Image (cartoon, rainbow, N blue to C red):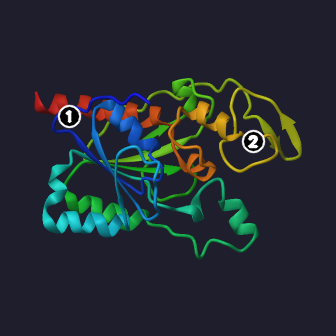
Amino acid sequence: MTLTVPRPGLRLLDLFCCAGGAAMGYHRAGFTVDGVDIADRPRYPFTFHRGDALEHLDRLITSGDIQQYTLLHASPPCQSDCALSVGTNRSRGWGGTHDDLVAPTRELLDRTGLPYVIEQPNGRAAIRKDLSLCGEFFGLGVLRHRNFELGRWATVQPPHPRHRGYVRGIRHGVYRDGPYVAAYGSGGGKATVPEMQTAMGITWTDVREELTEAIPPAFTQWIGTAFLSCRQEVLT
């Protein structure tokens, strides 16, 4: 795997980083990336800190070390309102024990005074949908719709491209083929691990759970590039 040489002085903090799908995109946009996750992530491709993401962020704010970062990215868990799980949660009486860390994450991010990005899947997570991206925008083999709240900066929403067909698999008892794979779960025509890797452009992990949670690096490469363009306009 060939890594881009980051630009001097550009540093990004990747909170709730999982295996580094978002991190790789920001890296390709020119950032040096530090990741934080509660679980061990031995395949994370950049500097990694294991621990509670919000406690780590709070320590950085208290010490003043947060000022070493140019941009902050957070993908806090919000399983109770995720589109993939909300129906199942309701039918099975689930939801009360799922973490929803969006609000406390935003509160800490606002305390930093720095620009930030909060990422969430489609669903009812309580974020502003300042930006919505889809794999078709980048010609990927997954749709992977994701919403992003942008704090202390803004960019133009690109037009949502027309999908080329179905996501391959069984839905409501009917099997359909299509140009996209379902990069979650197993069975029913869902993607194999190699198919998930290819569809999302992720080569450094072959762990299904990590691929299921990841966003394609193309998403955050676009976001990082857009942020730097806005930043340059402000500086000039």
Q: Secondary structure at mark 1?
A: helix
- In the rendered structure, which amino acid carries the disc numbered 1? Arg
Quote the CA–CA distance across marks 2 and 1. 40 Å
Residue farthest toward the right in the current orientation of the protein: 173
Q: Which residue is mark 1?
A: 231
User: From what the image shows, is residue 224 above or below residue 96?
Assistant: above
Image coordinates of residue 120 in percent, x first then y, are 49, 51
Q: Is residue 219 visible?
A: yes
Give me the residue at 44% from left, 28% from top: 158
Q: Which residue is mark 2?
A: 190
User: From what the image shows, is residue 56 above or below residue 148?
Assistant: below
Give me the residue at 48% from left, 49% from top: 19
Based on the displayed image, in which of its 4 quarters is residue 165 positioned? top right
Instruction: Between residue 125 and residue 60, name the one nearer to us.
Output: 60
Give me the residue at 83% from left, 33% from top: 176
Q: Is residue 130 visible?
A: no
The answer to whether 82 appears left or right of 166 in the picture is left
- In the rendered structure, which amino acid carries the disc numbered 2? Lys
